[in-house]
Image (spheres, rainbow, N blue to C red):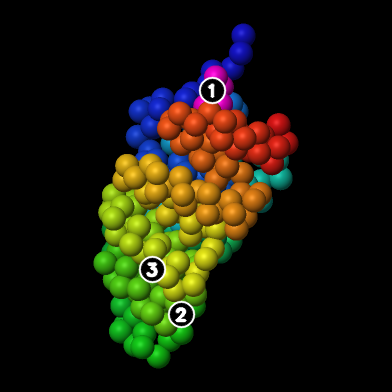
Amino acid sequence: MSAQSYTLQAVLALVGISRSVVNAMLAARIVIPARGAGNRYLFSFQDLLLFRTAHSLRAANVPTAHVIRSLKRLEALGNGRPLTGIRVTALGGAVAVKDEHGHWHVETGQRIMDFDAPGSPAPVVTLNPAFASATTLDGHALLEIARELEHDDPDEAERAYRKAIAADPALVDAYVNLGCMLCDRSCFADAIGLYRDALANGVDSPLVHFNLAVALEDSGAIEAALAEYHACIQLAPDFADAHYNAARLHETMGDDRRAIRHYQQYRRLEGG
């Protein structure tokens, strides 16, 4: 008997995860699905558990960008151990792993020590003063402040990302992280405008085109999304997920010839 598999629609229904988080996990190759009839995604039970982990972290207000970076880091540290065998939790807006010695932050590798007496309030670290003096900081410093603010003060995080972009209009990560925040809020029009601003500022990055395409697709602008997937492929012909998404949209629009061509490119890049 073959192992249980799940379509994308089944994953979305069973897990409740947003399409933008699924797309981010696929683009980061945290999950590599099999293919079913019509080259549809087919996910394993282990994939389903990973999606549940990501969804629970997002539900705990861990930003999508942090979830993706943490799962990739855990994958690199796993030495073949499946991520689904590791106890992953949200702690203070970050992703943590618990072992026999306690919790440690995934992104920093630092051990988390609990010095609080039972019942005593946890100390509060205020990041806003650093942001208040942000006019003296460069784009990269503002980017780091924005990342730290995402959990506790998303409105300030958005302002910090925009200040980072104003200080350094070529800062790809600021556009991508802010765009993910906007998509997580279903503010697709704002995300689309942001990514188009990036392109207008000369940030002609495959990742910007890909994320713009995802935002356009989620907003229902299928033809515009397809054009951006093609722009991504033109800059990065080996961007496998852009080929797959382009194939899927060509198939939806009835252009089987182009769909087959992109599916073939996808399979070649994936070694299938």
Q: Position of residue 261 (x, y in %)?
A: 62, 35
Name the image quarter holding residue 257.
Answer: top right
Q: Amino acid at mark 2?
A: Asp
Does the stretch in magenta take in 34? Answer: no
What's the mark number on residue 61? none
Residue 38's tag is 1
Mark seen at residue 168: 2
> Magenta segment, principal secondary structure?
helix
Tell which circle, 3 or 2, labels the residue nearer the N-terminal end.
2
Image marks 3 and 1: residues in contact by CB distance under 8 Å: no
Amino acid, disc 3: Asp
Query: Spatial distance from mark 3 to mark 1, Cα to Cα?
Result: 36 Å
Foreground residue among 13 and 112:
13
Residue 103 in percent (x, y) is at: 51, 54
The residue that label 3 is drawn on is 197
Whole-number angstrom distance, CA of label 2 to CA of label 1: 44 Å
Label 1 neighbour load within 10 Å: few <14, some 14-19, many 20+: few
Residue range in magenta is: 36-40
Q: Residues within 10 Å of mark 2 (few under 14, many from 20)?
A: some
Q: Secondary structure at mark 1?
A: helix
Which quadrant of the figure contains the N terminus?
A: top right
- Under mark 1, the amino acid is Gly
Q: Is residue 42 visible?
A: no
Q: Nearer the viewer, residue 253 or 8?
A: 253
